[in-house]
Amino acid sequence: MSEAVATVPSEEMARVVYNALAFLPARSMVKTARLELDSAGLRATGTDGYAIGQDTCPVEDYSGPPGGLTVHVDRSVLADLDTAGRKDKKGFGKLEVKPADGLIFRPGNNDTPTAGQDLSATVEPVWDFIDDLFTRLEGRPPALPELVAFDAALLARFSKVKAPKVKLEGSGANLERCLDMAVFNSKEPILIKIGPSFRGVIMPIDREVHAENVGQDGLW
């Protein structure tokens, strides 16, 4: 059975799985998040079909197939990994990924390992679409339309994203990262970036359909 093992900075791992968890609500029609481990890093992606959150962190001492390995885990596993990584603070843990079996995170503080089952056999056919969507949107020239409508609850998820802060030279202050949008038109998915590694997508509301359903009074 294929296996991939790498050393990961525990707090960075916690950050990326937390950011994926923010986009996998309990009532999501998509029941799993995707974790990909290769020599370039650990990448975690969460979605409910309406908004996508994806983040990455670096790894060291990677051992496994050159193309990496992937597992799908549920919300509880993401939450457990987040807790274990934050408790390990500045430590480094070992992450083991075994498709069709699961994953194990062994924190550097020698705390109890965190294990999770791989649910790849039950996943919905959404992940190829997500990969194609990022590929299609990235690199396109943005064109800001005059009017764009959002589901406020979806947009609020991006406020939960954790990104490394920037230290302002000369003051000692730490600045929060901004949310940067690439808007193509009022109906296309919108590409979002927060900090150096997080990227996401949000579906805008179709304003014409919304007006038909609930009326024009809430729209400009």
Image (cartoon, grey):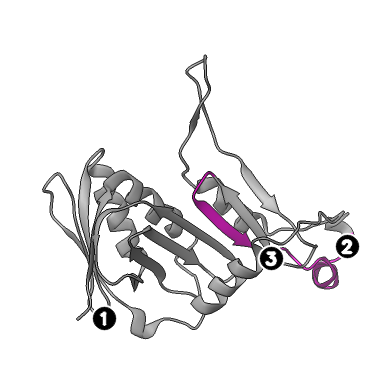
Residue lying at 52% horizontally and 14% vertically, measured from the top left: 170
Please provide percent x and percent y for residue 153: 61, 56
Determine whether, in the image, residue 68 is placed left or right of residue 218: left
Asked whether the residues under the numbered discs 2 and 1 touch, taking CB atoms below 8 Å apart as contact, a structural biologist would say no
State the separation of the CA atoms marked 2 and 1.
50 Å
Of mark 2 and mark 3, the one earlier in the sequence is 3
Residue type, label 1:
Ala
The residue that disc 3 covers is: 189
Determine whether, in the image, residue 54 is placed left or right of residue 73: right
Give the quarter of the figure containing the N terminus: bottom left
The boundaries of the magenta stretch are: 195-216
Please provide percent x and percent y for residue 184: 77, 61
In the rendered view, would you say 90 is above or below 85?
A: above
Asked whether the residues under the numbered discs 2 and 3 touch, taking CB atoms below 8 Å apart as contact, a structural biologist would say no
Give the quarter of the figure containing the C terminus: bottom right
Q: Residues within 10 Å of mark 3 (few under 14, many from 20)?
A: many
Give the structural element (helix, strand or loop) at label 2.
Answer: helix
State the separation of the CA atoms marked 2 and 3.
22 Å
Residue 100: image tag: 1
Residue lying at 88% horizontally and 62% vertically, measured from the top left: 216
Of mark 2 and mark 1, the one earlier in the sequence is 1
Residue type, label 2:
Gln
In the rendered view, would you say 119 is above or below 190?
A: below
Asked whether the residues under the numbered discs 1 and 3 touch, taking CB atoms below 8 Å apart as contact, a structural biologist would say no
State the separation of the CA atoms marked 1 and 3.
32 Å
* Residue 197 is one of the magenta-drawn residues: yes
The residue that disc 2 covers is: 216
Q: Nearer the viewer, residue 61 or 12?
A: 61
Q: Nearer the viewer, residue 4 or 76?
A: 4
Please provide percent x and percent y for residue 190: 68, 60
Residue lying at 75% horizontally and 58% vertically, measured from the top left: 141
